[in-house]
Image: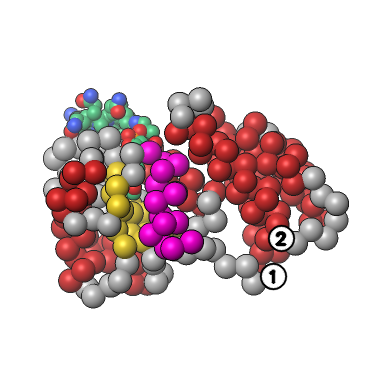
Amino acid sequence: MADLQALADALIKGDRNKVVELTKKALDEATPPKDVLEQGLIAGMAVVGRRFKANEVYVPEVLIAARAMKGGMEVLQPQLAAAGVQPVGTVVLGTVKGDLHDIGKNLVGMMLTGAGMKVVDIGVDAPAEKFVQACKEHNAAVCAMSALLTTTMPQMPVVVKAVKDAGLTVKTIIGGAPVTQNFADEIGADAYAPDAASAADSCKQLMGV
Ligand code: B1M
């Protein structure tokens, strides 16, 4: 019986080699890929997310854990696909037009991936049309926007309006240092998240999972 707790612990420690080794071992022992994902990798990343939210760990630890998760996912991905395991939903994620900050966005992407979502990252300086196009193309459940500048926050209502005008049923979520819940309410975004771990929780809520 594979020790999925040991896998989760290795991920929490950011030990990429151990994560790769234990993921391979679990699969060799015929553990269902879905269990390896949910009880090993996602369980570990959820702990990292909670600790990050509580300021018990910081950006470097999250990046190291995410790198370990990526190692495990590279081993697991073909088996997940073969077993027909689908991501819980797709999120289109980008930094809005005029804004080049991507460190926070990337962290959000890692947390969403770590929570079992498919992330379509459209990068930085993304105009509303690019969000809309990606949401259509990938049949996204959530459209997620990041902004770090007060001067680029006004792009967020532009995206919110554009996805509505395009007739998409996609939910919208916003975040970034200057962004607030009040601003989200003002512009009619479906959710606001103050940090990457909360963004993962909120996206799951928006997807109803
Ligand atoms: Co810029 N910058 N910067 N910068 N930069 C800030 C944001 C600033 C606060 C610095 C300051 O003046 N004190 C200031 C903004 C002021 C304002 O408008 N309120 C500023 C400025 C003014 C500028 C320039 C205009 C400077 C200039 O050229 N005169 C320029 C703008 C360029 C542009 O975008 N067009 C600029 C440029 C840059 C660099 C390119 C040099 C670099 C970015 C590199 C990169 O991202 N690849 C940079 C950096 C690094 C910063 C600071 C120092 C750090 C930002 C960061 O990465 N934080 C920043 C000052 C600061 O914050 N101390 C600053 C770490 C990151 C993990 O946090 O991004 O907040 P953060 O993400 C968090 C949450 O906000 C949240 O989760 C993340 C993790 O928990 N979150 C979401 C983020 N997105 C989310 C989305 C969600 C949910 C949560 O849902 C979808």
Image check: 31 left or right of 48? right
Provide the residue span drawn in magenta: 195-209
- Residue 83 badge: 1
Q: What's the residue at 50%, 25% (across, down)?
A: 56
Q: Nearer the viewer, residue 38 or 68?
A: 38
- For label 1, the crowd category at 10 Å Cα-Cα, with few meaning under 14, some 14 to 19 and many 20 or more, is few
Q: Which residue is mark 2?
A: 33
Marks 2 and 1: in contact by CB < 8 Å? Answer: yes
How far from the left and from the top, in percent, is residue 144? Answer: 33, 54
Tell me how far mark 1 sits from mark 2, CA to CA.
Answer: 7 Å
Label 1 residue near ligand 1, CB within 8 Å: no
SS of the residue under disc 2: helix
Q: Which of the 4 image quarters holds residue 87?
A: bottom right
Indicate how the structure is coloured in the image. Answer: secondary structure
Of residues 188 and 135, the one nearer the viewer is 188
* Main secondary structure of the magenta stretch: helix
Q: Three-letter amino acid code at disc 1?
A: Ala
Q: Earlier in the sequence, mark 1 or mark 2?
A: 2
Query: In which image quadrant can residue 130 be found?
Result: bottom left
Work out whether 193 lies above or below 92.
above
Residue 150 pos. (x, y %): 16, 37
Decide if residue 100 is in sight here.
no
Secondary structure of residue under mark 1? loop
- Camera-side residue of 135 and 122: 135
Q: Image check: 43 left or right of 131?
A: right
What residue type is disc 2 on? Pro
